[in-house]
Structures are given as structure tokens and as C-alpha cells.
Image (cartoon, rainbow, N blue to C red):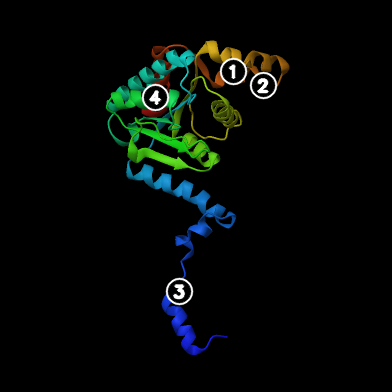
Amino acid sequence: MPKKSESKEISKHFSPLEAWRNPAFLSSPDARLVRIVAEYLEPAARFRKHEVHNIIVFWGSARKLPKLKKYYDDAEKLAYMITEWSKKLGEGKRQFLVATGGGEGIMGAANKGASKAGGKSVGLNITLPFEQMPNEYVTRELTIQFHYFFMRKFWMVYLAKALIAFPGGYGTLDELTGLLTLIQTGKPKKKMPVILYGSEYWNKVLNFDEMVKWGTIDKKDLDLFKICDTPEEAFEFLTEKLTELYLS
């Protein structure tokens, strides 16, 4: 046991960290729940501060591929149209902001369209091994970085009033099928129009009619989404549904 004088000497130089200031603890498995709660509370505070109540989510590939050029252009145009329409609705709870996963490709195109229309847009970015960086068009104060995919998905759906799936890979399929499962099972208490954008892509990648034939989904489950091929068609469908559900 240290002598009394030694204890005083130690106390002069030793200042233990509170748990919430301790980076080693906060990064450890023991603090996983703290990190999960933080990814709920911090976005909630940010959205409350900036009065974000409703988002229209654009999903799609982060890759920049020549084959997808048409879809980048269409995502940009549709986001522009939605933002212009939303700006005329007034402030607060009548506003619908474009939201994406924050990355490049189709996500970047949607944020670009909103920016060109003079509106804010949300970027729900995710930390990945290859360091996905937020695109340059997303509104900085509404760029939120997530570690956990499931918390990012929560925020994509929680504020969403409509969702649009452009051509994408595993991530887009994961987000889309997860959402359709939630709607199919009646988990959300709100109505959310869902668009699959690009029949040429989706009819080849997902054969819903074959799933109906096999009995793994019901025919009525095909009504959970609408396939669109032009920004004008998607815009007309969305604005009609959103007006009926949230603005009437």
C-alpha cells in the first residue's frame, strides 16, 4: 500500500476520465448500446433543430457507370421537380426534403437535383471499409454519418413519406426488400408510396410475377409499389399520393 505522501503525489498527476469522455471505452464492445443510442438521439436532435419532418428517399447505386447515365439524369431531374414542388407548400411540416444514402452515383444525382432547385437535402451516409464519403451536393448540416446499417435504415424509413428505388446493387435490394417486408406486414402506421424506377432494370432483376406463381407472395403484394420510367410519371404519381395522404 502506498504511503500517505505517495498517494498525494499520485493524485496530483492522475485524472481519470468520466466514462462518456473515455474513447477506449466508447469504442469497446461494452459500449455498443451507447453507440446505438447515440445513432438514434443525435440524428433526432439534428432533424428537430433543422425542422426536418418529411423526407422522400432516393435509393440507387453509388457506382458511376456509363450504362446508368440515363438514371443519373432522371434522378437529378426528379429530385429537382420534387424540391421545386415542395418549396411551394410552405414551411415546417408541409415540406418534403429529398434524402439519399449520401454517396455518389444515383444518390449524388438526387442531392444535386435538390441543390439545383435551391432546396436542402438529407444525406444518411455510412462508414464503410472503402470510406464512402458524402457527395458534394448534400446539405452539410443534414449530412449524418452512421456506423450501424440498421440505424441508418431506421432513419430512412422513420421520416419517409415516399421512397424511390433506382437501379442498384445489394445495398439497394436490401433496403427495398426490407421496406416492402415492413409494409407487407403492416409495421409502419403511415402510408408510403414506393416507386421502382426503371422497368428495364427491375423486371429483369426481380421477377415478382414468378414469385406470385410460386406462391411466395400474393398478387395483392404487387400493389405495394409502382414501376415508373420517366421523371414526369414518377412526379405525377408521388405528388398525387402525397397530397392525398398528407396535404389534404
Q: For mark 2, what is the residue?
A: 217
Which corner quadrant holds the C terminus?
top left
Foreground tag (2 vs 4):
4
Residue visible at 38% across and 38% down in the picture: 143
Give the left or right position of residue 167, taking residue 45 as reference: right
Q: Position of residue 86 (x, y in %)?
A: 32, 26
Q: For mark 1, what is the residue?
A: 222
Q: Is residue 212 above or below residue 55?
A: above
Packing grade of label 1 (10 A; few <14, some 14-19, many >=20) is few
Q: Position of residue 217 (x, y in %)?
A: 66, 21
Foreground tag (4 vs 3):
3
Q: Give the distance between the C-alpha atoms of the residues marked 2 and 3, in whole angstroms.
A: 63 Å
The tag earlier along the polypeptide, 1 or 3, is: 3
Amino acid type, label 1: Leu
Q: For mark 3, what is the residue?
A: 14
Amino acid type, label 2: Ile
Amino acid type, label 3: Phe
The tag earlier along the polypeptide, 2 or 4, is: 4
